[in-house]
Amino acid sequence: MAKLHAFKGFRPGKENVNEVASRPYDVLNSKEAREEVKGNPWSFLHVVKPEVDLPEDTDLHSDMVYNKGKENLQKLISEGYFVQDESDMLYVYGQTMFGKTQYGIVACAAVDDYLNDVIKKHELTRPDKEEDRMNHIRVTNFNAEPVFFAYPDHAELDTIVEKVVAGEAEFDFTTDDGVGHHFWTVSDPGQIN
């Protein structure tokens, strides 16, 4: 089984989560993202699609784009819109679409588990897209978007997630696209282990 680790995550404050939340970078083209960020300087799209803050003819893979993403991330942090947790945690994220909710655990996974085929590839990705995201991570020093994993049935893990989601969520809101977002923190060492 893959090894997961708790970490000190960055997240928006409760009072501004709606302003920061954004759709994933790969569901919008640059033009759509420019429209979506109008009037919202705190949208996370400024980090994951930083070309929205540069001239339209900018090469999307230039250092200028990645550096702008880093600058925008630092602005979110320095202005208090993104705050790092003080202790290592796991996080449970729920997403509701079309009346159905899926839950997942947000954690760090070991790259070696991927390289050693403990974590199985679930889709074919384009090398140019992989390189773009790797460059984004290298320059920003920040993994800005999650990688989703599925896991075989695991009753003990399912029970822990059920207990967590029975409690009050840190965030519980619906975005303009009708998707519900629910977020819990797990700081109890017993649950983390």
Image (cartoon, helix red, strand yellow):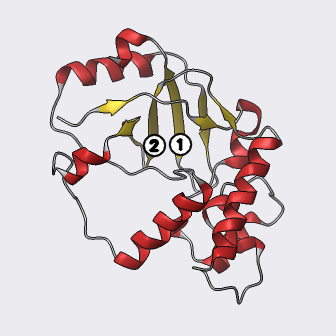
Dividing the picture into quarters, in which one does residue 85 lie? top right
Identify the disc placed on residue 44. none
Q: CA distance from mark 2 to mark 1?
A: 5 Å
Left or right side of 49 for 151: left
Dot 1 falls on a residue whose secondary structure is strand
Residue type of the residue flagged with mark 2? Thr
Q: Is residue 24 visible in this depiction of the protein?
A: no
**Mark 2 Cα-neighbour bin, 10 Å: few <14, some 14–19, many ≥20:** some
The quarter holding residue 169 reads top right
Q: Residue at x 76, y 47 (%)?
A: 76
Q: Quadrant of the N terminus?
A: top left
Asked if residue 114 lies left or right of residue 21, the reply is left
Within 10 Å of disc 1 (Cα), the crowding (few <14, some 14-19, many 20+) is some
Residue 174 falls in image quadrant: top right
**Nearer the observer, 106 or 88:** 88
Identity of the residue drawn at 56% across and 71% down: 28
Q: Can residue 150 be spotted in the picture? A: yes
Percent from the top left, x then y, of residue 130? 40, 69
Q: Quick one: label 2 or label 1, which is nearer the N terminus?
A: 2
Residue, disc 2: 96
Whether the residues at callouts 2 and 1 have beta carbons within 8 Å, the answer is yes
Quarter in which the C terminus is drawn: top left
Identity of the amino acid at label 1?
A: Gly
- Residue 111 higher or lower than 121, as above or below: above
Q: Position of residue 106 (x, y in %)?
A: 42, 36
What residue lies at 41% left-to-right and 79% top-to-bottom?
128
Residue at left offset 36%, top offset 14%: 191
Residue assigned mark 1: 180
> Please, what secondary structure does the residue beneath circle 2 have?
strand
Judge whether 4 appears above or below 157 on screen: below
Residue 110 is situated, as x and y percent measured from the top left of the image, at: 31, 41
